[in-house]
Image: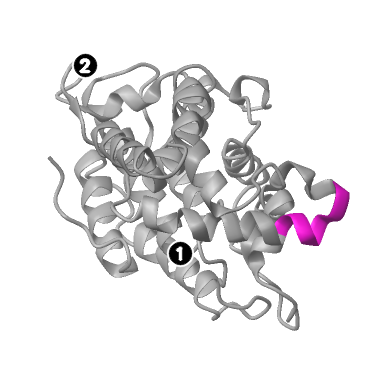
Amino acid sequence: MYPRVVTKDPAAVEVEVQAVYLAMFSRGNRVFVPQIFSWAVDCFTGLHPDYQRIDAGYHDFEHTLQGTLCLVRLLQGRHRANARPRLTRKAFELGLLAILLHDTGYLKRKGDVKGTGAKYTAVHVSRSVAFAGELLKRQRFSGGDIKSVQNMIRCTAPNAVPSRLPFANQLERMVGCAVGTADLLGQMAAADYLDKLPVLYSEFAEAARHHGSKGDMFGVFSDATDLIRKTPAFWEKYARKKLEHDFAGVYHFLNEPYPSGRNYYLERINANINRLRRKLSRLPGG
């Protein structure tokens, strides 16, 4: 359905994003995508003057690239469907900035040598919002554009309700829903999603230790196996409902063809969940 893109390779994702961007906006700024990808690469690979390279095991740079790829595919699908309000080039660009910067809150400052960036899990969204504000101000984005990107990043918080965020207009809110959707779908559809669940648990455990009583929300899993056992329920009872309601069902624009065609991301997630259920059924007590 989609061309194969190696999400471990930022250059490969950049090429695909640039192709989608220019297919949608033939008069778009041809240096925009390469420029913002270079910022993201610098941030996540340790070339930022104030921050170390990402060292969180689950929320790594590939996680961001998976979400980025999903976002542009979703927005392209919506564009092709001629949905209203019409997606503008500017809204697309702001959304792309938001998804690329949405997990910069896991980055540690230079000199921060204790633990990994996963210790910031409970506050990573607010840290990402602050990081994006600093970077975009330095790159001379307008205050309004910075606020839009920050609100889109806030849509990736577990308890985010985009309808309650102070977006400037309906279009920007829709892109925020798309960013939150892509963050969920990009990771859960990955071929190695199940393999990385123990790593996700280790991030939660580190966050719980770092935040003390404030980290109780991450202590709901007794161990990695407990998290794995609860993952099907997470998908059915939390993620799917959030996609449909809080994120206004924008994931349907990934259907190919729209509106009733196959949805590659849902198919891959359902395959992952079904494979996990089969694995759990073979465990003691399964």
Mark 2, secondary structure of its residue: loop
Residue type of the residue flagged with mark 1: Phe
Q: Seen from this angle, which residue lies furthest right?
A: 213
- Mark 2 crowd level (few <14, some 14–19, many ≥20, 10 Å Cα): some
Could you say which quadrant of the image residue 85 lies in? top left
- 194 in relation to 285, above or below: below
CA gap, disc 2 and disc 1: 32 Å
Question: Is residue 282 among what the camera can see?
Answer: yes
* 102 left or right of 235 in image: right
- Residue at 29% across / 58% down in the picture? 30
Query: What's the magenta bit mostly, secondary-structure-wise?
Result: helix
- Residue at 24% across / 61% down in the picture? 15
- Magenta segment: 207-213
- Residue at 24% across / 39% down in the picture? 24
Question: Circle 2 sits on which residue?
Answer: 259
- 155 in relation to 245, above or below: below
Residue type of the residue flagged with mark 2: Pro
Q: Position of residue 18 (x, y in %)?
A: 27, 55
Residue 61 is tagged as 1
Q: Position of residue 105 (x, y in %)?
A: 65, 58
Question: Is residue 130 among what the camera can see?
Answer: no
Mark 1, secondary structure of its residue: helix
